[in-house]
Image (cartoon, rainbow, N blue to C red):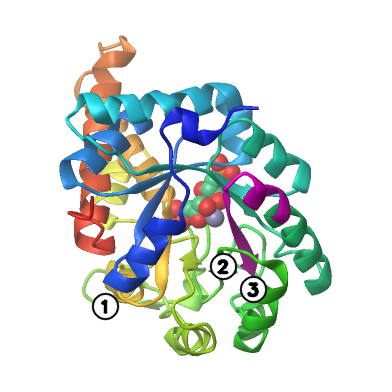
Amino acid sequence: MTSYKELGLVNTREMFAKAVAGGYAIPAFNFNTLEQMQAIVQAAVETKSPVIMQVSKGARNYANGTILRYMAQGAVEYAKELGCENPQIVLHLDHGDSFELCKECIDNGFSSVMFDGSSLPYEENIRITKQVVEYAHAHDVTVEAELGVLAGVEDEVQAEESHYTKPEEVVDFSTRSGCDSLAISIGTSHGAYKFTPEQCTRDPKTGKLVPPPLAFDILHEIEKKLPGFPNVLHGSSSVPQDEVDTINAHGGKLPDAVGIPEEQLREASKSAVCKINIDSDIRLAMTAAIRKHFDEKPGDFDPRQYLKPARENMKKMYIHKIVEVLGSNDKL
Ligand code: G3H
Ligand code: 13P
Ligand code: ZN
């Protein structure tokens, strides 16, 4: 058993309370590689931002859960080395799909876990979330739950209203499950293809897809039912078109990739949305830099030659998100 406290990590309780009161959101960045971890820490330290470093099941399969845990511990030490006296770094399990996985992560030094029961029947979602909460709280670990189904082309679910979080359920769900924060569905979805071309309109000037707006009416209803309760947005990449264009200009093929406009995320950050999950945009930033590098320098084969510009481009993206979208800078 390793407590996250021994590793210098923190849970989300205090940072969410501050974010809700201050009208900003905490960035939650997925990480799988050393370069992502380094760039997250550099960006968080330079902007004086708290940060959630999150690990998906896919990340654990790719990089090994133990290694990622030690990388998070390394992140705390690296932040101190970069001059941050009191780093506010959370190690979070993203989309945990069972009590056993959540428990394993808590036992191995995670300071926050998500139990994603969004695909389960309502009562089953409450039952397992509550089980996770009881174990987590006994170790001062915070728990994110999910209510509502994120629409998306990946899982062939259409963005119908019936999949949005039902505001009339949030009080019952959060009270009975005891969760610390709630991931809600208001029109975001995972990946770089969040909407089909049929769900969008097209900008006549650029030819680019314009996605349907987020359901702010539902967000406001949820806020009215649960004033001050921390809400979470998954699937919040914006799919920056300059990165997509760079990828496509250097041999990639990402036609009609589209995300959530940053203005809408900025708007959501000012309300009770206090955690915003971003993964795909970082993947795009990394891929764009690497594709460009190989195109321009086909003779390079030392990974450091192309991972360095990839890391720099990711860092730029992390800083942009923190300062221009979430507003979590200067909060340490
Ligand atoms: O929720 C999805 C995240 O982007 C993680 O994706 O499961 O491919 O690591 P992944
Ligand atoms: P994106 O795919 O939009 O970056 O969402 C990531 C996410 O929600 C991770 O849980
Ligand atoms: Zn997610």
Marks 2,3: beta carbons within 8 A: yes
Q: Tag 2's secondary structure?
A: strand
Left or right: residue 158 versus residue 84 is right
Q: Is residue 16 above or below residue 202?
A: above
Task: Inspect the image, locate mark 1, and give the three-letter code of the amino acid beneath it.
Answer: Pro
Q: Which mark, residue 275?
A: none
Question: For the image shown, how many numbered marks are present on the structure?
Answer: 3
Coordinates of residue 146 in the picture (x, y in percent): 63, 65
Residue at point 20%, 46% (across, down): 48
Mark 2 or 3: the one toward you: 3
**Residue that label 3 marks:** 174
Q: Which mark, residue 204?
A: 1
As rendered, which of 239 and 332 lies closer to the eye?
A: 332
Q: Tag 3's secondary structure?
A: helix
- Is residue 109 magenta-colored? no
Q: Which mark, residue 182?
A: 2
Q: CA distance from mark 2 to mark 3?
A: 8 Å
As rendered, which of 281 and 219 lies closer to the eye?
A: 219
Residue at point 60%, 79% (across, down): 164
Region rendered in magenta: 134-148
Q: CA distance from mark 3 to mark 1?
A: 44 Å
Q: Earlier in the sequence, mark 1 or mark 2?
A: 2
Q: Residues within 10 Å of mark 3 (few under 14, many from 20)?
A: many
Task: Inspect the image, locate mark 2, and give the three-letter code of the amino acid beneath it.
Answer: Leu
Q: Earlier in the sequence, mark 2 or mark 3?
A: 3
- Image-quadrant location for residue 246: top left
